[in-house]
Image (cartoon, rainbow, N blue to C red):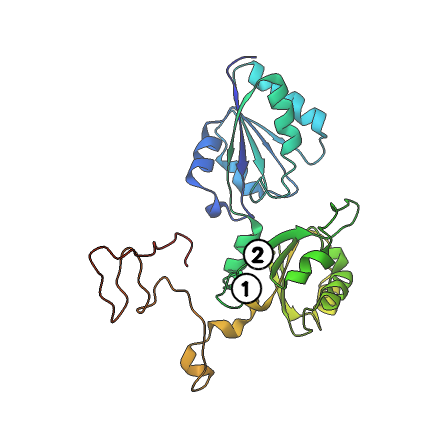
Amino acid sequence: MASGKVYFIGGGPGDPELLTLKAKRLMETADMVIYADSLVHPSIVEFARPGAQVHGSKTLNLGQIMELTLQAVKEGKTVARIQSGDPSIYGAMLEQMRVLEREGVDYEIIPGVSSAFAAAARLKVELTVPEVSQTVILTRVEGRVSMPPGEELSSLASHGSTLVLFLSITRMPRIVRELRAAGYPKDTPVAVAYRVGWPDEQIIRGTLADISPKVRAAKLTLQALILVGKALDPALRQPVTSLGEGTEVATSHLYSETYTHRYRLGKGRSRAKKEPVPAASRDGD
């Protein structure tokens, strides 16, 4: 096999400005671009250099995609395989990597912005709120593709954490039933994000009590993400003073003036010469 290389590139949720700088650079230099044209916004492939071969993959099967890829690599070319969102989440990338491994082809994965995090940004929510939810489960409900044992929605829902459901919008009534049966209250906030970052983006907010008819009225059947959990409650963004006198609101320790960590002494604390000090974590604890 010649010295060509394949890059699996996260194309993000749709907005071309959410591409990473590395993704853009590689697209601008690739000899061939193969992109999921049913999911990746067409403006993204405009970054392909003049003269590059550009192929949409929505009508191609795995064999056809890999035939294009391997032929290009054999000719010493660079291939940019553009996947929607981040390729590590429902990216159908593993079967492609197996072929490249078998053929001894060099490849690299370039992460992208998942629609899960683009939706959270659009909703202005933090998915991990102290004392509300510190766990996010990314999953789907069973349909034509079965779920491994123990990953049924009813089982995952028993944790009561923040849920992000991919590829499941046509099963909204069933989702509501299973979440309610698992213990989620009927007033649990729910948001549906359709094609975040596209011109026809649509956001539907509700609760488990009313989200099903709202989704039905919107006639959404594809490319919609479902987010569920108390962390989605818009009231969490309200200033503490507006929540009433004496209201206690949990916050992250990281910036608290009373919390001591490696880089800062908490208010009213003194640091002994050899006193061990907790390290500030990178993720906000």
What residue is shown at x 48% (from left), y 36% (from top)? 47
Would you name the residue on which mark 1 appears? 133
Q: Type of residue at label 1?
A: Ser
Q: Type of residue at label 2?
A: Val
Q: x and y percent of residue 65 in the render?
A: 66, 27
Q: Quadrant of residue 24?
A: top left
Determine if residue 43 is in view.
yes
Question: Relative to the observer, which residue lies in front, 88 or 39?
Answer: 88
Instruction: Locate the N terminus and report the quarter of the image it occupies.
Output: top right
Q: Are marks 2 and 1 in contact (CB under 8 Å)?
A: yes
Relative to 2, say whether 134 is above or below. below
Mark 2: secondary structure: strand
Left or right: residue 153 compared with residue 109: right
Q: Quadrant of residue 29?
A: top left
Determine if residue 198 is in view.
no
Cα distance, mark 2 to mark 1?
8 Å
Would you name the residue on which mark 2 appears? 136
Q: Quadrant of residue 148?
A: top right
